[in-house]
Image (cartoon, grey):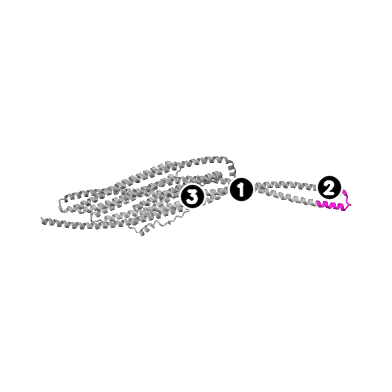
Amino acid sequence: MEKKNSVDLSLKLDHAKLETERELKNKKSLEMEVSQLKLRLRSTNPDQAELSQLEHNRRSNLFTPDMHRLIEEARLARTRLAAESYENRTLKALLRKHGISDLNLSNYSSKNESEPSEIKIFNDHDEVDELRERLRLEKESNKRWEERYVQLQKQSVINKTKNARESIDIEAYDLLSTDSMEYKNKYQMAKIEIDDLKEQLKELRIEAKRKPVQKSNVLADTTNIENRTLASLDNKSKGENLRLKSELMSLKTKLNRLESGNTSRFEQEEEIIQLKNHLKTLELSNSSLQASKEIYKDRSEDYYAKLNQVENELHSSKILEAKLKEDISHLKSQANMYQSKYLESNSEILKLNEKIGKLEKNLIDREFEINKLNDIISDLKDKLQCSEDLRKSVKSVSYDYHENEIERLKKELVNSVNKESEMNGFIKSMNAQLETLRNKVNAEKSNSSQLNEEKNKLARSLKDCALKNEELCKHVEENINKAQSLTQQVNALKVTTADLTRERDELFAAKRDLEDKIRDINSQFEDNLMKAKENAHTVVLNQQLTSELNEARQELSEMRNKLSTYENNLIDVTGKLELKTKEYLKAVEDNKKLVKFNSKLESDISIMRQRYDAELKAQDDHWSKRVSELDEKLRVFRSSQLTENYKINELNGTIRELEAQNQNLEHSKKHLKDVIRHLEANVERLQISYENSNKREAEAQTRSLHLSNQLDKLRESLGVNI
């Protein structure tokens, strides 16, 4: 089983390393893509880059300090709720183990489960209030379960003290069991105090995160407080451990005094065998505990490394997010500028269209007048023709009158021709003006089409930046969840390592006590051998006992060799750990170099951008006035859309967090079921071993009776011979 566990842990470690490497590669690829996009934006269209920067700044301003505070309170309430529910489940499992049925548990817990368990999420304030209410209910139920558990422990101790055994061995066993129960209660109370201190540390860290000023001082204060609390807890645990060891030693001395009454040689043999078996089991458990301690130590160090790596990734992702927000805000400003320019161009186009309409109306009026003049000219020509016909046909009319009439008609004809030429010139000038106006309209339309194309490009780039920003936000949330899970695993590993060290110390103390007992028994056995050498009939028995003693010594030497091998393995593991730490430090230095190189590239890019902005400042000012009006409507439309998307994303995030909490609760439930099965199997195994020990004791008693009978017979035969 130990090999299997070690193999599983190594596979998990490799998997975690692969995940971290993959995340680093993804991070580097994202940074390269972001830098390439920035270069493209700045090279192709600096206005678009400025719009993206403005959009980024606008999004960064969406989160107010109140929103941050509410989010932090909601996260703190969720962590407290998870911790309280975990402690509640452990207390329920312990109460079931001590004989309380599921019916009693349901009756006892029905008082606290009157309110619905589902959380309806309306907004951040409602969610925080509901989480606080659930946390309060969980704390009250936790206190009630703890009181119930303490009462049951007291009742079990009272029942055990009332049912006193007749034999001395059973009395000693009861004494040890009651003391062990008291020690368990004290250990659980100490564990609860440690959990409270951890909650206080978490609150202090959250308060330190809320204060943006003097972060370094706050971090130093929190680390000093954490170190002081950990040192105080360590001192308390050491003092409690020493006190428990002293009480255990006193109980063992009492047990030795009780066992010193059995001075017969056969009972000493049985005791030697039992002590050997006990020593073997203790050494096996010691070795397993040592191995598991090393495994948990490696796992905790790996988790610390992962936690630091995730924090670094989180910091870098926040920096990238800030940069993207600045780019988006800049693009927004450019979009506003282009929109204002587009609106101005549309207004100019409308004015030109009005002028063209007026000119067309004037042209139509002029054409109507020209048609009238043409009709008049045709009438005059008809009149002239008629007059000539009349002049030819009628000679009685005076010649002077007709000449005057002809002159008058000629003058009118000349005037009409002059008017027609003037009207033709005016029509030509109006046609020229119309052509120029049409050319202007076409130019404005082409400019408006270019503006529409640029607007579409900016919209596409804004969408791309928004998608990348959402991906980065998801990545940041995943890193936060990973960091929280890693911190929880590190805390669990700390608790398990402390338990393992305590059990190891107890096993070492028990081993030393057993070795002292074996030395005392060996001295007594050698004294008995010296006395038994005088009797010739007990030579065979002495040889058997000496052979068994030699075997026991060989087994002790083998066990010592195993301990030395375990110590050598420990030295090898520490050497490997140092190599890993060196590799980690090397990777950190490489990362610092890359960060410096990246900062240098960013400074060069900023210098080039300033030069390019200085060259195109005049064009930007001209187009910014026209696009600002157009982008105002776009901004109003998209702001409402962004607020709705933000609310939907927040709801999805809370749903994902609640689903993750449900999955964690199911995993912990499965783990507790496995632990209960393991404990039941251990209880059955202990019962079987207890029955076997009773059988062995009965066989030893029968054997001692048989040997005493044989010894009486030998004495009788010796008395008869004498």
Q: Is residue 72 visible?
A: no
**Mark 2 or mark 3, which is nearer the start of the sequence?**
2
Residue matched to label 3: 471
Q: Which quadrant is home to the C terminus?
A: bottom left
**Label 1: which secondary element:** helix
Q: Residues within 10 Å of mark 2 (few under 14, many from 20)?
A: few
Say left or right for 454 vs 477.
Answer: right
Residue placed furthest toward the bottom: 103
Q: CA distance from mark 1 to mark 2?
A: 60 Å
Residue 233 location (% of width, % of height): 35, 46
Residue 609 location (% of width, % of height): 54, 41
Say whether marks 3 and 2 touch (CB < 8 Å): no
**Label 2: which secondary element:** helix
Residue 449 location (% of width, % of height): 61, 48
Report the amino acid beneath label 3: Glu
Q: Residues within 10 Å of mark 3 (few under 14, many from 20)?
A: few
Report the amino acid beneath label 2: Glu
Say left or right for 267 vs 458.
Answer: left
Instruction: Residue 448: give its label.
Output: 1
Residue 413 location (% of width, % of height): 80, 48
Q: Is residue 297 above or below residue 708?
A: above
Q: Residues within 10 Å of mark 1 (few under 14, many from 20)?
A: some
- Give, as a single range, the part of the protein colored magenta: 381-400
Seen at 46% across and 45% down, the residue is 316
Q: Is residue 311 visible?
A: yes
Say whether marks 1 and 2 touch (CB < 8 Å): no
Residue matched to label 2: 407
Q: Does the magenta segment cover residue 386?
A: yes
For the stretch drawn in magenta, the main secondary structure is: helix
